[in-house]
Image (tube, coloured by chain):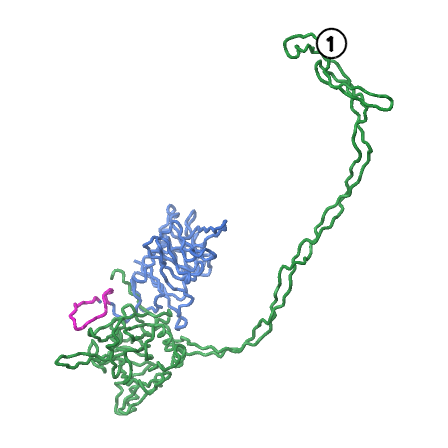
Amino acid sequence: MIYDYILSTGDSTISGSLITGYTGHKAFASNFGETFYYNDGLISSEKEMQLSSNGQTFYEDIPIETQATNEKIYQAFSGDFFLKTGSTVFFDRNKLFTSSGTPFRAAYKVKYQKYTGSSAVGLGTGSDLGITLTSGISGVNTSLDFDGYDYFLNGQKIYSGVGIGVSAGVGTQFTLSFNSAYGGVLTAENKSNYKAFAFIKRDRVKQVSGSLPDVYGSGFIENQTTFYLNGLNELDENYLELYTGVNIIKAGEPAGLFNFGILGTSLNLVL
Amino acid sequence: MPASGVQFSINHNFTNNDLLLAYYDFSSGTGTNLDLGGAYYAAIRNQAPATNTGAYSGIILDSTAGSEAGAKTFATGTFITGSKGRLTKSNLQVNTPSLDYSSLTAIYDFEFDPASPVNDSILFGALEKTSSTINGEVVTGAKGYNFGINSRGKMFYQGFDSRGDYIHTASSIELSKRNIISFSVDSDNLEISRIDHLNQEEKKENFQINTQYIANADAFYIGGSPTYYGGGDYSTKITSGYLNSFILISGYLSSELVGNVSSGMIGEYSFSSGASTTKEQITGYSQTIIYKTGVTGYDFNPTGTLSIRTGREMQTGSITFQGTTSKTEGEKYFKYYTVNNGTVKSFYKEEIGFLHPDSGYVYSPTGSGAFATLGLQDISDNINLYLEAEGFDNDGTAAINLFESVVQTGTLDEISGVVQTALTKTVDVPAVPSSGINLTGLSEPFKKNYIYYLGQRL
C-alpha cells in the first residue's frame, strides 16, 4: 500500500496561511443522472481544476472551438473532460463535458479542487509515452526537475520507481520512462492503452508518501489536504485531521450522554 | 496589541461596547492588569474595551497568600508565564451577581499544553446542582452550566433541565493545538463553534436546549466547576491548557459574528493614514461631428473615337457575269433578265428548273421512280453565274468620341456620428485612512499535525 498525503503548510504567520483566491478549495460535483455540474463561482476559467471520479484523476483539456452556423462546435482530442467557460449558452456554463471513454456514472463521487498550477499531457499513441510526456512537460515548464511534478498514468498517481522514472538527463533536463526498468507497466504492445499526464506541484505543500497510513508531527492547514491511496484520490472522509494530543476512539459511536437518571447501556470504546 | 484589535472588531460589528462584558488578555505577560484583593488574592482585571471594567474580574483562586506581594508573585510568576494564563496552576473565579446565563456568549483563545495529553477541561464552569425538600419530596434543580473540552478533544456543554442532566458534544469539530472556540446560548438554542481563521470559515454545531431551566449562578469558573461529571468542586483544576485571551458577551452571537470578533483576539489593529495622490478627473467633453463620406459625382475622361460608315446599302440594278456552273436536269436555279431602256437599268430573276437543251422538251418517262416519272434525264450542262451588284447610297463615315466615367468621392452633407473627447483636469485626492486587523500571529499552533487514516479501522 502506498499512502500519499499532500499537506498545505502555509506560511509561518496566520496572514500568510489564509486560503486566498479559493486556491485549494475542494468541492463535489453535483449530478443529474450522468451529467455532472461544478461550481462556476469557484472554477471560473479553463485549467483551474483537478478532478477525480471515484479516485481516478482526470485530465482537463482545452477544446478547439469552431464556429458553425448557429452553433459552436467543441472538440477535445487528448483530455478526459473539458469546460465551456467562454461565451457559451447558459446551461453549459457549469457543466462537465466528458470524452466518450471517460467513466462518469450517476453513482460516482466526482470531486474537484481549485488548482492554479500548470499541467501537461502525453498520449501514448504511436510513440513512446515517456518521450511524449517529457515533451508535453517541456512545453509547459522547463525550470522544474523530475520531483517538481505529480505524475498520473490512466488517472492513477504513480511515483518514482513505481510506475515512472528518469531514463536520461539530469536536473531540469530529464526524459521520462514508463517501462518496466523504472517500475512501469508499459510495453511495446500495450503502450497505446495508456495516457499519462503531469501536474506541477503546488507551492507550500509537504508531501508525505510511504507505507504508513498515519502522519504525525507535520503541521498542515485543515481541509487543505489531499490523500492518494495506491494512486487513487481518496475522499476526505476516509481520514481525520487531528491534533497529536487527542485520543483516538472508535468512530461512529455517539459521544453524548443523556438523562443521567436513566440507566443506560455500558459501552467500552476501543482506543 | 490584541486589545486594540478587539476594540476594532467590536466597533466594527456592534454599535457600541455595551455587550462586551469581560475581556481578559494575557499577551502582556507579567504586565497583565491585576486587581489585588483585601484577602490577599490576585485577580485578572477586566479590561477595556469592556465597558464595566470594575466587574467580572477573574480571581486567581490559588493566588491567595499572606500578602499582596505573595498573591502578585503567584499571579505573575506562576499563573501567567509566557504570556499565557496557565489553567493547570489555578482556576479563575468570576463573580456574576447579575449575569443572565440564558443569553450569553463566551469566546476563548485556548491552547492545549503539549507537555500533557488532552484531558477534560472546563472553560466555563457554573453548573451547580441544588436540591430542596418540598412536601417530603426531594426536588433537584441547577444553576448555570458547564462548557469545556473532553478527553477526546471535543467541545461539550453540560446542563440540566426538566429531563435531568445532559451533555451535548460537538462531535464533528476537531480541535488544533490552539483554537478560537465559543459557545452561545439563547432562546432554547446552543451553538458551539470553532473559528478556523486559516480557512476563514466557522465550524459549528447547534443543539436545542431548554433555556428556561437555566438559572443564574453566582459565579462561573474557568478551569473548574462546582459540579462536573468527572467529580471535584470549583477549585479542582481540571483543565490542562493555556488561555491566551477570553471574551464574555451578553446575548447570543452567531458563529459568523464570533469569527469577526475573534479576529481581534489573534490579530493586531492596523491603521494607515494613507497618502494623498492626484488623479485626472473628467470635467466635460468636446464634440466633433463626423460627416459621412461617399460618391459626390462622376468625371468623364475621353478614351478614343469610334468611326461609323453612313449611307444606305442598296442594289444597283446591274448584274455582273461571274462565270458558269453545272446544273443537272431538274435542278432549280435563277434565270436573270435585264431591262435597259436607256435611262432605267434593272433586272429581274425567275427561279426555274433546268432542262437540258438536248432533251428535246418532250415528256418521255424513263421509269417508275420519281425522277424517271417526271421524264427528266441524268444529264447536265453549264449555265451562267451572275452577281447582283450592290452599292451605298450617300456613302460616308462619321467619327464618334468615346468616354469613361470616373467616380468622384468626398464628404457628404449627412452626419454619421459625433466623437466625444473627454476634457480632464488634475485634481488632488486627499489621503484616505484605512484600518483593519492584521493576523500577524504564528500560524503553526492553529494547524493540525496528525492525520489518522480510518481505512481498515472503520
Q: Residue at x 47, y 77 (%)?
A: B434
Q: Residue B126: which quarter of the image? A: bottom left
Name the magenta segment's main secondary structure.
loop
Q: Is residue A144 left or right of residue B455?
A: right
In the shown orientation, is residue B146 left or right of residue A184? left
A222 within the magenta span? no
Q: Residue at x 33, y 53 (%)?
A: A106
Q: Residue B189 placed where, x, y %?
A: 28, 73
Give the number of callouts.
Answer: 1
The picture quadrant where one finds residue A265 is bottom left
Q: Which chain is blue?
A: A
Front residue of B190/A233: it is B190
Q: Which residues are magenta?
A: A249-270
User: Residue A264 lies in magenta, yes or no?
Assistant: yes
Horizontal and vertical percent position of residue B93: 27, 84
Disc 1: which chain?
A: B
Q: Is residue A167 visible?
A: no
- Going by the image, does B171 lie left or right of B443? left
Mark 1: secondary structure: loop
Residue marked by disc 1: B361
Q: Quadrant of the N terminus of chain B?
A: bottom left
Q: Which residue ends up furthest to the right in the rendered image?
A: B342
Residue drawn 19% across the image and 74% down it: B164
Locate residue B175, reporting x and y percent. 30, 71
Specify whether residue A106 is in view.
yes
**Quarter of the figure with the C terminus of chain B:** bottom left
| Chain painted green | B
> What amino acid type should be assigned to the residue bearing mark 1?
Tyr
Q: Residue at x 40, y 56 (%)?
A: A95
